[in-house]
Amino acid sequence: MDMTTFLNTLLSTANPLLPDPVAMRVALPLVWAIVLGSGAFFLASPLARSYRLGLSALVVLWTLVPGSASPAYWLGLAFQTPSLTSAVLCLGWFFRRARPAHVAAVTPAPCSLNGLAAAGMVLGWVLLLDTLAMWPASVYAWGFSAAAVGTVAAVVMLFWAVWGGTRAGRRGYAPWLIWGVLALFVISRLPTGNVWDALIDPWLWVGLQIAWLISAVRRWRAKRWPATIRA
Amino acid sequence: MPNSFFSHSVRHRLLSGLLIFAALLGLELGLRPALTPVAQAVWPLHGKMETANALLPMGRGHIPMPADTPAAHASSLLAMPAANPSALLAFWFAGTRESAPDVQIAASRFDRATQQWRAARFVVNRHALGEQLGFYVRRLGNPVAWLDRQGKVHLFVVATGLGGWAAARIVHLRQRNEGPDFEQLSFEVVRVLPLSWLWNTSFLVRTAPLSLADGGMVLPVHFELGIKYPVALHFDAMGDFKGMVRISSRKHVLQPTLVMQSESHWLALMRDQRPDGKVAVAQTLDCGQHWTDFPNLALDNPDSSVAGLAVAPGHLFLAHNSSPHSREMLDLSASSDGQSWGLAQALAHGAGAEYSYPALAWADDSLWVSYTDHRQRIAWQRFSMSPSVR
């Protein structure tokens, strides 16, 4: 492959690689099962661990039921398939919270995902405004190019090289999360063949902003009324 | 120097990161299909047309409806190859009313032997579509058909999600069975076309694709959640999606119809949703890779769909509602340059009537028009231009 062909292939949005239709149909209930199963585990937090696990398993099985009995059949109507990032985050969160206590005690806590969350919020806004044709060029269409995958991988690499690593015994999971999502996307092309759909979905974007808002209010209250005054 | 920018740990992470980056990009590029050259459009009429003669009416009527379906809308015509027993296939949506739960995609064929439209049958219903997609489909509409290089019919239909037409998606279907037997015609889902990040909502299809010399096509679609803007989708000869390009920067134009001026110079003529709108125009000079807005045509557009077809160089046709505020008049205009249009044929006029959503096709040396008649039936007309075709 000469340099011109390489650059054309890299930058072109005219040779998208879309997921296999069968894989798309399998992924829809599977990804919703991961998201809803984790959600059930979260909502059932007052219950004992075994009950929470049982409830999650039931929700996962219910979601995987073929046809209109599955909640995925109805959620897909409105929201299609969640992003791979949502699936990986939910899966990671679930395994972290569902571990027995003696395993949790010896595993270092992950670093905060604040930087990643901020990047996700910005990306979501860019894509939302792009949907409403606010940009001169289509950002969504660019997500079909190999260059978009390369750019995301390169940005993550640079951030990880400069600011990454283990700090105070806490692992930096964020780069590995995105690289993992990119690797899954490159292999499977799920959920749509567009890298932006793999990285972030509108619900994840809304969730990030709510989480950021709650965190900002907490910080503001802590700053305005320090613990000693509140006490 | 632990605080140095290029400390050992930074170098180590940079090297590891570079390896991961290279692996991801290498895999991404390696798995991608080869880039195909940009293809030019092809004229439907391969012969040379010497004069801009008048259209000669050859026939008109209504396409048979499926039983017990009082409503019909949004027809699409597909010219079939010479060896096929059908000259044309017509697709439209039909049911008790527009957006009713029982609306399905109906089809009929114009039989070459008998020169008649044959009985219509339903070819797509939303329940079967939902089963194949794995999620519920609320409503169906706006079928648009295309024939791939293997002779398989592809159908693009609008399937609504949570909400009305503004929450619609475009579903791509492909003929399941082989062969030209219309009675066996059935479709399997290829995919929902990935067109927007916002749950992939609010893209609709309405008008016919423009055929390309490599066997592929360009399918005009539009976005309509709040604002309206047109987009061109590119497909290869097998019907594989090859990307999307925005046609216009305007936020009030929709349902583009693509008309050739030359093999690489195309116009997109569009419906204008504003009051007192005119037919809007954008053009491309590089086979749809880049588009620029153009001044509106002088033709009125009462927020109504138009259908264009260039059958040969200098012979452009546009079916459109010609009164500024209603769909009571449907006309066929002709142009040699895409800018100046004159009346070629009055298609249907009637006080209080609605004649709308036209479709054009070239088949068997004739120009065919279909359109919605009172939202109840699909009417058709056929015009000959053969006396001057060489």
Image (cartoon, grey):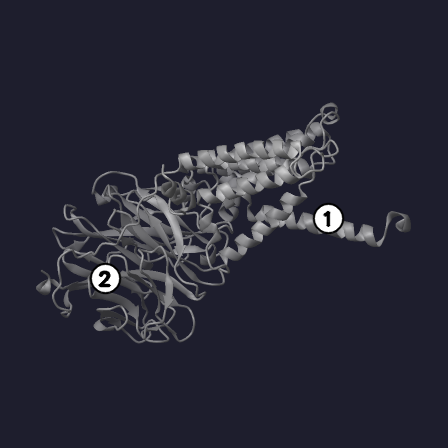
Residue B51: image location, x then y, percent: 12, 68
Residue A94: image location, x then y, percent: 64, 33
Q: Name above or below for residue A194 compared with residue B267.
A: above
Q: Nearer the viewer, residue B300 or B16?
A: B16
Chain where mark 2 sits: B
Residue at image location 35% in from the left, 55% down from the top: B289
Q: Residues within 10 Å of mark 2 (few under 14, many from 20)?
A: many
* Quarter of the N terminus of chain B within the rendering: top right
> Which of the numbered marks, if any, corresponds to residue B383?
none
Residue A124: image location, x then y, percent: 57, 51
Q: Dividing the picture into quarters, in which one does residue B70 lie?
A: bottom left
Chain where mark 1 sits: A
Residue at image location 30% in from the left, 54% down from the top: B209
Same-chain status of marks 2 and 1: no
Q: Dividing the picture into quarters, in which one does residue B386 lie?
A: bottom left
Q: Is residue A71 left or right of residue B107?
A: right
Residue at image location 56% in from the left, 43% down from the top: A155
> Which of the numbered marks, if any, corresponds to residue A215?
1
Q: Nearer the viewer, residue B312 or B299?
A: B312
* Quarter of the C terminus of chain B within the rendering: bottom left
Residue A201: image location, x then y, percent: 55, 46
Q: Is residue B89 left or right of residue A77?
A: left
Q: Secondary structure at mark 2?
A: strand
> Which of the numbered marks, if any, corresponds to residue B310?
2
Q: Dividing the picture into quarters, in which one does residue B6 lie?
A: top right
Q: Amino acid at mark 2?
A: Ala
Q: Secondary structure at mark 1?
A: helix
* Disc 2 from disc 1: Cα separation: 60 Å
Q: Amino acid at mark 1?
A: Ser
